[in-house]
Image (cartoon, coloured by chain):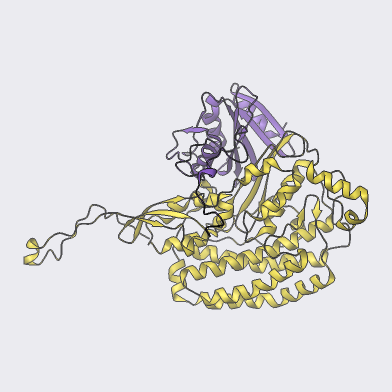
Amino acid sequence: MAFEDQRTTVYKINPEHPESESLPTLRTEELLLNMGPQHPSTHGVLKVILELEGERLVKSTPVMGYLHRGVEKLAEDGTYHQFIPHTDRLDYVCAMYNNFAYCRAVEKLLNLQVPERAEYLRTIVAEVQRIIGHQFWLSAQALDIGAMTVFFYCFRDREILLDWFDELCGARLTTSWYRIGGVERDLTPSLIDKLKQFLDYFPPKIDEYQVFLEKNRIWLGRTKGVAVISAEDAVNFGLSGPVLRGSGVDYDLRKYEPYSAYPKCEFSVPVGKNGDTYDRYWIRIMELYESVKIIRQCLEQMQEGPIMADAPSVTLPPKERVFTNLEAMIQQFKLFSQGFDAPPGEIYCGTEAHKGELGFHIVSTGGGKPYRLKIRAPSFIHMGAFDHMARGYMISDACTIFGTYDIVMGECDR
Amino acid sequence: MHPLLLRVQHTFSTGVTNLSEWRGDVAVTVTRDKLREVAQFLRDDPGMDFDYIVHVSSVDWPDDEERFEVVWEFYSIRKRQRIRLKTRVPESDCVVDSLTDLWKGADFMEREVYDMMGIRFRNHPDLRRILMPDDYTEGYPLRKDFPLRGKGWRDTFEFLDEVQR
């Protein structure tokens, strides 16, 4: 979209008109507008200072930190196990993926092998979480742009999965189901049945979401060619996930640094062409189909087996034993109060969450607490490209760009 | 030794203080004055080709002479490889070169490091606090000498007490 710099233009009312000399010239100036911190489309508390030329964005400066809780500082004060519930509160819409990314990072630090069944369970739940995340994103993005119906349809289906989570771990959003070395509990036959039912029910619903949007002229007009970012810039800014793939860069850690049960599943990584909001929307829709495929394969391939690594010095004992066996209770108490002895070293481990690459950089000097824990939050890094992507678009497109990043401020501000 | 490390070692005779590989992560530690040169090499050399910036982090080692460590993590989209670049800065002269002109994404990441650890980046276009308030004066929260509960600034806020409510 071309953007003419009109900052210096002084408009005269109809210069052809003979009387126009006597008319006053209209004064134009840049307008500074505070968008947020309380604005429904900022997905939390985010303020952006917009410099406007008419309705065009000249420059935008994100002001962040309203939800900063010092999670990285808190991590240094607790043991590795104690940090898992904190990760729920990063991206509070998709807690499972945060747990997953964190547990993987600690396992890399400890060089801990997770049993095969646990890997499958982790992949299944992570993909269920990806579906929830994309449903939430689609409903919020469509609502920001003005399409309300999709919101209700997405939330109807999201509710089924949240109830499924509720049955799995007792919580809908702050789940804490992943554990270092495995998972907290196995899927029951009832859960597997419900998931299979959902997998049959869901793909037609994805088509349904598309029906609302694909032929909607307003949706197309507000997403096609909006917030375009070239592949080169997207890479240079460090964008990840659907935002990067929308620009045609094939970068998915599930495929290129395979982990968990992903290498055993067949799935494709949808990649866009134009780098606009519409391509990013298309990628997420396609990922919903891929997620269904991955879960199906995992459920088929999964064999019986242990769900927790055999490393009693690190992993938590099963809950049944904690309540009946003294040694197990002592072990649980010690693991939470003192922690396990992690080897000194430094690792970075990135995981492909539905928003992008969620990474943990952990520095350990030995002992039960991380010396330094840095979270690479995709939302934060995407906000770094906001000014670049918004420049020249209309003020109403700012909402589209928040939506297309799928930002959650809990993760952005940490 | 990892081929990436060998290549760095062969290219730079001075300035590289440590090369390490642990748990599959490759890390290069350089002196502060060589940082830009090595970063440029990592980005532009065809064998390296690190076009993607993953994150910028910082570690505080209060007992060391060069107290702070700044950590950059890079990825190569074409070569599918990772590398970690580290450098140390003393507390008395807490400045490193900014890499924002090589990777634009470093802008926000370096601002966060400045905000949390107080390390300044030379030639950074807009080095301000990013997560803490602009008028925050208690220092840099992720330093090891910063107490977990803060330094009392929060206690100065006036809240309604429960009786009034």
In the rendered image of this protein, does residue A21 appear above or below residue B79? below
* x and y, in percent, of residue A225 in the image: 44, 63
Horizontal placement of A238 versus A52: left or right?
right
Quadrant containing the N terminus of chain A in the rendered view: bottom left
Residue B125 seen? yes
In the rendered image of this protein, does residue B90 appear above or below residue A326? above
Horizontal placement of A86 versus B140: left or right?
right
Query: Which residue is found at the position 50% from the left and 40% from the top?
Result: B111
Horizontal placement of A112 versus A77: left or right?
right
* x and y, in percent, of residue A246 in the image: 54, 59
* x and y, in percent, of residue A388 in the image: 43, 51
Of all chains in the rendering, the one displayed in purple is: B
Query: Which residue is found at the position 9% from the left and 64% from the top?
Result: A20
Q: Depth check: A189 or A49 in front?
A: A49
**Tally of numbered tags:** 0
Q: Depth check: B150 or A399 in front?
A: B150
Chain A, colour shown: yellow
Query: Which residue is found at the position 77% from the left and 74% from the top?
Result: A194
Query: Which residue is found at the position 62% from the left and 51% from the top?
Result: A357
Quarter occupied by residue A88: bottom right
* x and y, in percent, of residue B29 in the image: 63, 29
Residue A274 seen? no
In the rendered image of this protein, does residue B136 appear above or below residue A271? above
Horizontal placement of A246 versus A222: left or right?
right
Quarter occupied by residue A96: bottom right
Q: List the single residue furthest toward the front.
A: B163
